[in-house]
Amino acid sequence: MIFAFEPGSEPDKRRIVARIADESGVETYNCSVDACSNPVCRCRTTNVLLTPRTPGLPERKVALDLNTRGIDEPFAKRASAEEIAYSERLLAGMEEADFALLDSIHYTMKNQICEEAAPSEIKAHFNFDEIERSSLTQAYNDILPFGNRFVITVGDADYVVLDQYCVRPGCKCTDTYLNVFPVEEHGKLPEATGVISVDYDAVRWEAGAGEPLACDVADLRRQMESASPGLYKRLRARHKKMRAIYAHCRQRELEARHAVRDAAPVGRNDLCPCGSGKKYKKCCMGKMARTTLLDGDRELPPAMVNAIKAPRSP
């Protein structure tokens, strides 16, 4: 194993140390790790800065993609041949435990980024037309993919509960819509699940029609209330945050549409005037594309899977 927390350091200030063997011995580095600062980004790029403890060694920086267990593609495009060679050498010596440690650090950092970002700082993609036409609900962890999640145990099974909300302007509803997914071995989530509506003001739970539920509503309620004593205040706060994020994103969208309308004609393959960096045909030219967690990205972060699947005390 290359990466490890230094023994004896304080839990909230644990120093990461890397020990890399070569022909002449072992190189020792202090490590600092960072992650993408965009709260809505789903990438799992982890940047590692290695500062040598061993005299005479240069400082090193590598960028790893924890999804592919390889070198981050943008980093590889700009890195020197020496940096690539060093990154490959590092990867060749890494074990699954090294990736698990970086997974955990990355998830913790991204979770903090998601939860501490102000609504005005979050530039999420919404299907504005559909939301305001049909009150399409939005999942909290679709907008903030590494944000806090509800994870519960009912009987011997573990479940992830995804909470969705109406964000349509002017709506005063106090409802949360819950989808309950049994956690499978590698964090995969089933394709379909029933919906439970929770009125967090009236403290009322109701099972919706449609797909069957993954577990009993009464059992789910007991477990969620037990795990989160302030559950209903938490649901209210998450709904308020989702509405605020939507309001800021909607304002930016309206400004972008006005800019497109007022600007000179834009070609299909020109950069979109809204500043997204995408071609016009793939951005503001048509309805904004949107892939939700419930319809697309159906896999939990490995660090969360490892935590859920960790052996329990007897």
Image (cartoon, rainbow, N blue to C red):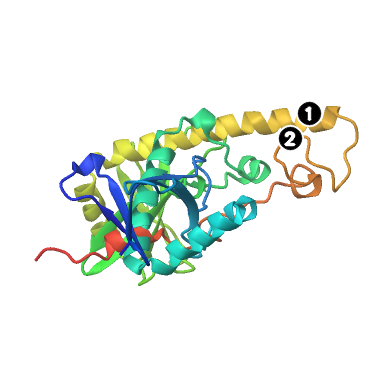
Count numbered badges in the picture: 2
Say which residue appears at 51% left-offset and 65% top-offset.
68
Q: Looking at the image, is 216 positioned above or below residue 120?
A: below
How packed mark 1 is, by other alpha carbons closer than 10 Å (few <14, some 14-19, many 20 or more), is: few
Q: Looking at the image, is 304 positioned above or below residue 211?
A: above
Q: Residue furthest left?
A: 314
Say which residue appears at 39% left-offset and 67% top-offset.
93
From where the camera sits, is residue 202 visible?
no
Residue 67 coordinates in the image, percent (x, y): 49, 62
Which residue corresponds to mark 2? 274
The quadrant of the image that shows the C terminus is: bottom left
Q: Amino acid at mark 2?
A: Cys
Q: Looking at the image, is 97 positioned above or below residue 176?
A: below
Question: Does dot 1 land on a helix, a strand or a loop?
Answer: helix
The disc at residue 1 is none
The disc at residue 259 is 1
Horizontally, residue 67 falls left or right of residue 54, namely right
Question: Does dot 2 land on a helix, a strand or a loop?
Answer: loop
How packed mark 2 is, by other alpha carbons closer than 10 Å (few <14, some 14-19, many 20 or more), is: some
Q: Nearer the viewer, residue 47 or 292?
A: 47
The quadrant of the image that shows the N terminus is: bottom left
Q: Residue furthest bottom?
A: 185
Give the mark nearest the N terminus, 1 or 2: 1
Callout 1–callout 2 Cβ contact below 8 Å: yes
Q: Amino acid at mark 1?
A: Ala
Residue 306 coordinates in the image, percent (x, y): 31, 63
From where the camera sits, is residue 25 visible?
yes
Residue 251 picture quarter: top right
Q: Nearer the viewer, residue 107 or 233?
A: 107
Q: Nearer the viewer, residue 89 or 66?
A: 89
